[in-house]
Image (cartoon, helix red, strand yellow):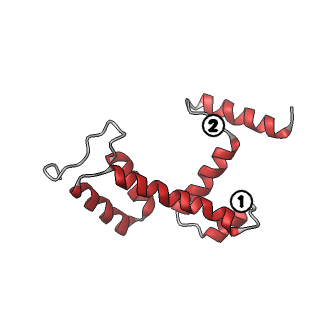
Amino acid sequence: MGPGQRIGQIVRQVAKKAGITKRVFPHLLRHTMATKLLWLGMDITDVQRFLGHENIETTRHYAETTAATLRRKFDQVTDPAARALLSGIRHNHGDDAALLAASLLSKDRDVRPVTSAGA
């Protein structure tokens, strides 16, 4: 068994113990970490160095993924009052807080969307 296979095996074992049922593999963890660092405001060139990318375009893929995820979550919230709420959260607290709020308000969760009557 090569080192890459062993790392994958360790990642799967840890995920199983943590109760994660989604298929997890080392590259997914790397991608998640890079995306989270960008959400938290780390400069893209620092993320580039952290990941060991020679070309900034490779790292830019993570930033585009972050922006696309945020747009998709915002698009899932259709109520005007909820969209206004998310815009305010994004303006005052940044993309990470807005993404969390959008996830809570989105239709794909068992949480009732905020409506103008309930706001």
Q: Is residue 84 among the parts visible in the rendering?
A: yes
Callout 2 secondary element: loop
Callout 1 secondary element: helix
Q: Is residue 5 left or right of residue 81?
A: right
Q: Nearer the viewer, residue 18 or 73?
A: 73
Q: Which mark is residue 51?
A: 1
In the displayed structure, 17 sits above or below 34; it is above
Instruction: Locate residue 83, reporting x and y percent.
Output: 28, 58
Q: Is residue 101 among the parts visible in the rendering?
A: no
Q: Is residue 94 left or right of residue 46?
A: left
Q: Nearer the viewer, residue 22 or 72?
A: 72
Going by the numbered disc 2, the residue's amino acid type is: Val
Q: CA distance from mark 1 to mark 2?
A: 19 Å
Dot 2 crowding, Cα within 10 Å, few <14, some 14–19, many 20+: some
In the displayed structure, 11 sits above or below 97; it is above
Instruction: Locate residue 108, reporting x and y percent.
Output: 36, 40
In the displayed structure, 82 sits above or below 92; it is above
Instruction: Locate residue 26, reporting x and y percent.
Output: 70, 43
Q: Is residue 86 left or right of residue 21?
A: left
Pick out the residue farthest to the right. Answer: 2
- The residue at 26%/55% (across/down) is 82
Going by the numbered disc 1, the residue's amino acid type is: Leu
Q: Which mark is residue 82?
A: none
Q: Is residue 79 left or right of residue 74?
A: left
Dot 1 crowding, Cα within 10 Å, few <14, some 14–19, many 20+: some
Q: Which mark is residue 24?
A: 2
- The residue at 32%/42% (across/down) is 107
Q: Looking at the image, is mark 1 or mark 2 earlier in the sequence? A: 2
Image quadrant of residue 96?
bottom left
- The residue at 68%/62% (across/down) is 58
